[in-house]
């Protein structure tokens, strides 16, 4: 019988280890079941470069008309631009119009925009659309509160610009940046 004791101890030890293993499994949280993904790839904002360019031109024209109105009114109510531009650009133009207002100035006339040549349409990147324009400011003047023309001398009348656009809601473009383009030959 001396052999039965070691076997019993071995069986008890094995049972204890097995029971401990089962207990550990029973107290663990069950593995979560994977949830089916319903993410469907968003279709591109535009089906072609031509559509992207047309939308960018439309967005820039809306910005230009509204910006002209705000400038004509001496920088009053720049918030009219908030639905046409990104928040970062809005902060910039708001500060510019506040400075115009604080100086007692307003803009007379309107800039014209021509060109509209697609520089980039890339739905996966930011900005998604970039367009070259020519901005002609020859018909604009800066006027002070006494009606004096204080338009800066020697300003560049025709300005090549590169406008960048981000996707807005619902499926519209917002102007995100306007920079002077270094290539004067474009205009």
Image: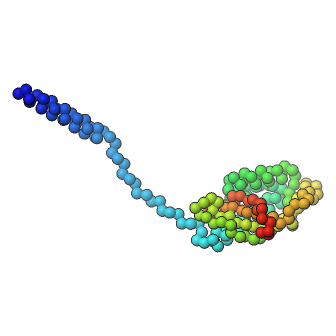
Residue 175, percent from left and from top: 69, 60
Q: Residue at x 36, y 48 (%)?
A: 32
Nearer-the-camera pick, 39 or 115:
115
Residue 41, percent from left and from top: 50, 63
Q: In the rendered image, which quarter is residue 65 located in?
A: bottom right
Look at the picture and state if 2 lies above or below 44: above
Nearer-the-camera pick, 47 or 67:
47
Q: In the rendered image, which quarter is residue 119 located in?
A: bottom right
Q: In the rendered image, which quarter is residue 27 located in?
A: top left
Residue 68 is left or right of residue 10, and the answer is right
- Quadrant position of the C terminus in the picture: bottom right
- Quadrant position of the N terminus in the picture: top left
Q: Residue at x 11, y 28 (%)?
A: 5
Q: Residue at x 75, y 59 (%)?
A: 179
The figure's colour scheme reads rainbow
Residue 85, percent from left and from top: 69, 58
Counting the numbered discs, the total is 0
Note whether residue 32 is visible.
yes
Note whether residue 109 is visible.
no
Residue 169, percent from left and from top: 61, 60
- Residue sitting at the far top: 2
- Residue sitting at the far front: 3
Q: Residue at x 36, y 51 (%)?
A: 33
């Amino acid at each position: 019988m001396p052999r039965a004791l070691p076997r019993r101890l071995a069986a008890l030890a094995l049972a204890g280890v097995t029971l401990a293993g089962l207990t550990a499994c029973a107290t663990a949280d069950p593995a979560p079941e994977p949830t089916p993904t319903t993410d469907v790839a968003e279709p591109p904002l535009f089906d072609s470069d031509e559509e992207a360019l047309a939308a960018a031109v439309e967005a820039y024209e809306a910005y230009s008309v509204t910006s002209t109105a705000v400038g004509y009114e001496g920088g009053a109510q720049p918030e009219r631009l908030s639905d046409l531009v990104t928040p970062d650009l809005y902060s910039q133009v708001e500060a510019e119009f506040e400075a115009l207002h604080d100086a007692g100035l307003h803009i007379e006339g309107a800039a014209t925009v021509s060109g509209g040549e697609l520089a980039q349409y890339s739905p996966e990147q930011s900005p998604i659309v970039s367009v070259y324009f020519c901005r002609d400011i020859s018909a604009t003047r800066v006027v002070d509160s006494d009606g004096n023309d204080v338009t800066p001398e020697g300003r560049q009348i025709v300005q090549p610009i590169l406008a960048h656009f981000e996707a807005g809601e619902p499926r519209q473009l917002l102007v995100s940046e306007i920079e002077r383009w270094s290539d004067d030959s474009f205009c």
